[in-house]
Amino acid sequence: MLLTNIKSLLQVRPQNVERVLGLEMNDLPTLDNAWLLIDNGQIVDFGPMDICPDDAEIIDCTGKYVLPTFADPHTHLVFAKPREEEFVMRIEGLGYEEIAARGGGILNSAKKLQETSEEQLFNDALARLKKVMKTGTGAIEIKSGYGLSVDAELKMLRVIKRLKAVSSIPIKANFLGAHAFPTEFKENHQGYIDLIISQMLPKIAEENLADYIDVFCERGYYNPEETAQILEAGVRYGLKPKIHVNQFSLSGGVQIGVKLNALSVDHLEVIGEEEIEALKGSSTIPILLPSCSFFLSIPYGPARDLMNANLPLALATDYNPGSTPSGNLAFVLSLACVKLRMTPNEAINAMTINAAAAMEVSDEVGSITKGKQANLIITKPMPSIAYWPYAFGEGNQLIDQVLIAGEVV
Ligand code: NIG
Ligand code: FE
């Protein structure tokens, strides 16, 4: 398959890069008036139109931009039911943490998930996955964490394993057994942590059910000591930490993540100088989740400070039924520009190559590089690439086609 007359091919990296650091993120390499050749699901070549090959099935891209699909390195895509009743409670004045303290929030989702069959969870998650692929998601990380019992956590992770098996995009599984304390362990935190360490982790390793380990390190959830204990156990089973930190408060979780060589520290709505200092010189990637800030009306993470510190900032949706009922990365693109004050170039770097790095797939996807999977977004004709985030609310309609391994989704 040959894409021709591409107005501009974006994120062109003839020499693959693994991640792009803060100050370089404003540089988005492009090739104007270009063609791109796909064979066997891979990008095999690209170049300027004046030396275009002509021996393949052609998609004419006149006026359109072509870029790598986005990666979404932080989602909770597997869940049983939406929670719009809590959304209404928040409108009426209750806070996210207050609702959780009354048995809503994560515990509400866990109760529903425990009652739902693996088959049902799989079918619903697959439908969500297909939907987000149509809107430009070409790699995704998916967490457990709505099980909160041995059986239900394993059930969630088996669903993710089945999604990996049937899906043509890279998927990574993150074990988030420590998402909340189940009610019966409210006064016995160590009892639940022991369950995670002695019963869940061995089974997960035995069935090869996870790539990463996550903890919700936050006041009212897991404190720094509990977080470190769980992550260290995960590391012993070969799971790299990739964690929730500093959503509502300064927890010390960033420093723990850095110390344990976390792949990423995610949320960071509340973050100080010390956290940024800790991240400098580490290989840990900061991930911001602006659609969560939007939906909960909480502060946005300090994208500019993170980039000024020369860190490889990445963005994700946080798709989940409580804090972010949206897997739409085109909306994240607009929020990145409007609320995080990122330039369109910076945002696209954060959502393609850096997002891929934040789930360890930047050698497979995330840039226009020969040999990478042909996971591509073809936009509608647009006056400039800045028009895309500018036309907020219309982001999806500005996607003409998504190709995954060279096949139209
Ligand atoms: O990333 N913060 C913790 N976990 C999710 C929300 C979970 C929920 O409300 O169901 C998040 O925002
Ligand atoms: Fe999350």
Image (cartoon, rainbow, N blue to C red):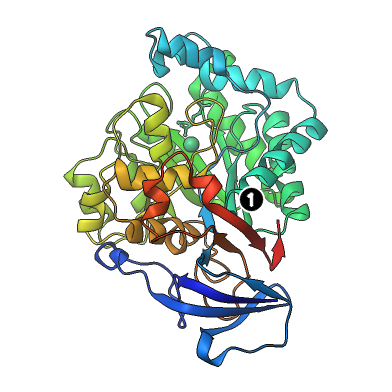
Say which quadrant the C terminus sits in: bottom right
- Give above or below for 193 relative to 341: above
Judge whether residue 292 can be spotted in this image: yes
Judge whether residue 238 can be spotted in this image: no
Residue under pointer 1:
133
- Give above or below for 395 relative to 5: above
Residue in the foreground of this view, choosing between 292 and 244: 292
> Residue 2 in the image: x percent, y percent?
66, 78
> What type is the residue that disc 1 sits on?
Met
Extreme residue in the right direction: 119
Residue in the foreground of this view, choosing between 52 and 238: 52
Which residue is depicted at the point 57% across and 19% down? 83
> Which SS class for mark 1?
helix
- Give above or below for 342 relative to 338: below
Residue in the foreground of this view, choosing between 228 and 343: 343
- Give above or below for 334 relative to 44: above
Taking the image as shown, residue 359 lies to the left or right of residue 295, namely right
Say which quadrant the N terminus sits in: bottom right
Taking the image as shown, residue 110 lies to the left or right of residue 318, namely right
> Residue 373 in the image: x percent, y percent?
63, 70
Q: In which quarter of the image is residue 222?
A: top left
